Image (tube, rainbow, N blue to C red):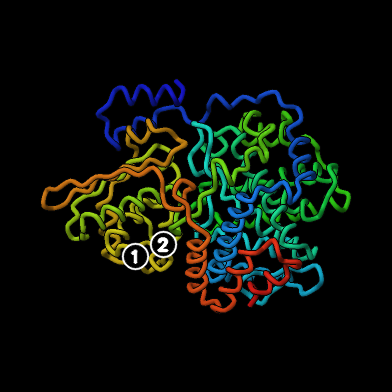
Amino acid sequence: MTRREAIAVLCIGGGLGIHGLTEAFADAPQGGSGKDQPHEAPHVTSYVADFIVKTRYTDLPPEVIDLAKKSILDGIGLALCGSVAKSGEIVRNYLSSNGLVSAGPHSATVIGSPLRAPARFAAFANAIGIHADDYDDTQLAIAEDRVYGLLTHPTAPALPAALAAAEVKLISGKELLVAYNVGVEVECKIAEAIAPRHYEDGFHSTGTIGTLGATAATVKVYGFDKPRVLTALGIGASEAAGLRENFGTMTKPLHAGRAAESGVVAADLAGLGWTAANQILEAPRGFFQAEGGGFDATAIMDKLGSPWTFVSPGISIKPFPSGSLTHPGMTEMLRLIQEHHIVADQVERVRVGANRNFPNALIHHRPKDSLAAKFSMEFCMAVLLLYGKGGLNEFTDEVVNRPEVQEMIRRVDFGVDPVAEAAGYNKMTTIIEIKLKDGRLISGRCDVAKGNPANPMSYDEVAAKFLDCTAFAKWPAAKAKATVEMVRRLEDAQDLRALTALCAG
C-alpha cells in the first residue's frame, strides 16, 4: 500500500481522531512516492552550472532583489543573535583554540565578535549563528507530495558562504546580490527536485542540499567558468550531510555551518585544480539517487530563475524562533487567545492536529531545554497560553523548566488530524481545539502564518525583527540601525567591507 492509498483508507474510515490516525500511520509504509524513480535528465548538473555562470545582476527582477534584501537583513540579524547563544561561544572557542583565527588579507568577519578567520571558518561560524535559534527563513514547497516548509532554510548556508567570499574578494553589493540569489535558487530547486524520501527518511536538507547552495554562491563570487563550477558541485555534493535525528540539539545548526563551510571549501579546491565528477546530480551513483532514491527532472530543468523561488512559491520569514511547522498553530493560538480573552487557568485541555509530517519533525513532546522546545508544538502552545507571546526571551532553558510551563505542556495533545492530512503535505494546515473548564469548546484553523508570502512581512517589519535580535544580542543600536539602512540600499555598496564592519565587534 502506498502512502497516498494509506491516507485514502484512513480518511474514508473516519472517526480515528488525531491519535488514532497517528497510530494507523505508524503501520503504513514510510517514504516513497511517484518521484522515487529517476527521470531521464542526463544534463542536470551541466544545466545548473550554466545557470550559475551566466546569471547577471540584470537578470534579477526588482521583486527578487527586494525579497532577497529582506532575507539578507534577516540572516545578518540572526547571526548577531546567534553569536550570544551557547553554540556561538563554543564555535569561537573552537576557532581560537585550534589556531583558526586570522587577520590576514584572506580572512572574513565572524559576525558578532572581533574575530576574523579564513573564509571557510567565518562562513562556518556565521551559518551556525543564523540557524542557532531556528528563526531563519524557510523555503516553501510546490509539489503536493512535498513537506510544506521543510525543504531547506535557504539563507543559512548560502548567505554566510557568499558574504565571507565577498569580503575576501572585495566585491560590490550588486555582485553579492547575484551570488546570494544564485545560491538560494540552486539550493531551492534541487530541494524541490529530489525525491521526498530524502527528508522523510532522515536527511536534513539544509545541511545536505544547503551545501550545494553554498557552493553555487561561492563559485559565483569567485567568477568561475563552467568546468570549475562543475568540479565544485561535484566536491560539494560529496561533502553534503546532516541527519534530522539531531533536531533540537546544537548539531542542527552545525549542519548549516558545515554546509556553508563545505561550499567555500569546494570552491577553493576547484580553483586549485582539484578534480571531481561533472555529472554529480543525475548520475546513477550521484547525489539525487544516493540521498533521495531519485528525482523529478521537471522540477529543476528549465526552472532555475523561471520563476525565481523568491517570487513563486516564495520564501517565508519566521515570526517566531521555533520550527516553522509550529507557526500556523502559534498564529492561530494567539488569535484565539486575543479574540476569546483566554486565560491559562481556564484551560482544561488543548488538541492540536496537523498532517503526519508535523510530529515527524516536531519530535520533542516534553522538552527540557530551549533547543528541544523549538521542536515542541506542546511548548509553543503552552508558552502562548501562559504569557501571550513566544519570542527569544521565552525560548530559554529557564522558561522551559518553569513548573507552570511543564504543567501546561501536559495539557496539550498533539498529533495527526484527518482534515489536516487531507489538505496535503504542501500545506501547513493546523487545527486547534481548546476545551475550557467551564465546558466551552473553542476551535480554529490556520493554513498560513505571518511571514508567509501570502501574509508577508514588509522590509520595515523585518527590520523590527532585526532590531529585536540585535537588542537580544546587546549589539550597539547605532550599528544595528546603520545595517538596516545599508542593506536597504545594498545595490549601491561598492565594497562589502562597509557592511561586514558593522557586524564586527
Question: Which residue is more in the foreground, 211 or 168?
Answer: 168
| Residue at the (32%, 45%) spot, across then down | 414
Q: Quadrant of residue 173?
A: bottom right
In the displayed structure, would residue 163 be above or below residue 115?
above
| Residue highlighted by disc 2 | 369
Q: Residue 401 — which label?
A: 1
Split into 4 quadrants, where in the image is the C terminus? bottom right
Question: Which three-letter amino acid code belongs to the residue tagged 2?
Answer: Asp
Q: Secondary structure at mark 2?
A: loop
Q: Quadrant of residue 7?
A: top left
Mark 1, Cα crowd under 10 Å, few <14 / some 14-19 / many 20+, is some
Q: Secondary structure at mark 1?
A: loop
x, y percent for residue 146: 51, 35
Split into 4 quadrants, where in the image is the N terminus? top left
Report whether 457 appears left or right of 255. left
Mark 2, Cα crowd under 10 Å, few <14 / some 14-19 / many 20+, is some
User: First in sequence: mark 1 or mark 2?
Assistant: 2
Question: Which three-letter amino acid code belongs to the residue tagged 1?
Answer: Asn
| Residue at the (70%, 72%) spot, across then down | 498
x, y percent for residue 478: 57, 79
Q: Are marks 1 and 2 in contact (CB under 8 Å)?
A: yes
| Residue at the (62%, 67%) spot, across then down | 91
Report whether 10 appears left or right of 39. left
| Residue at the (36%, 53%) spot, across then down | 330
Report whether 262 appears left or right of 25. right
Q: Is residue 211 visible?
A: no
Spatial CA span between label 1 and label 2: 7 Å
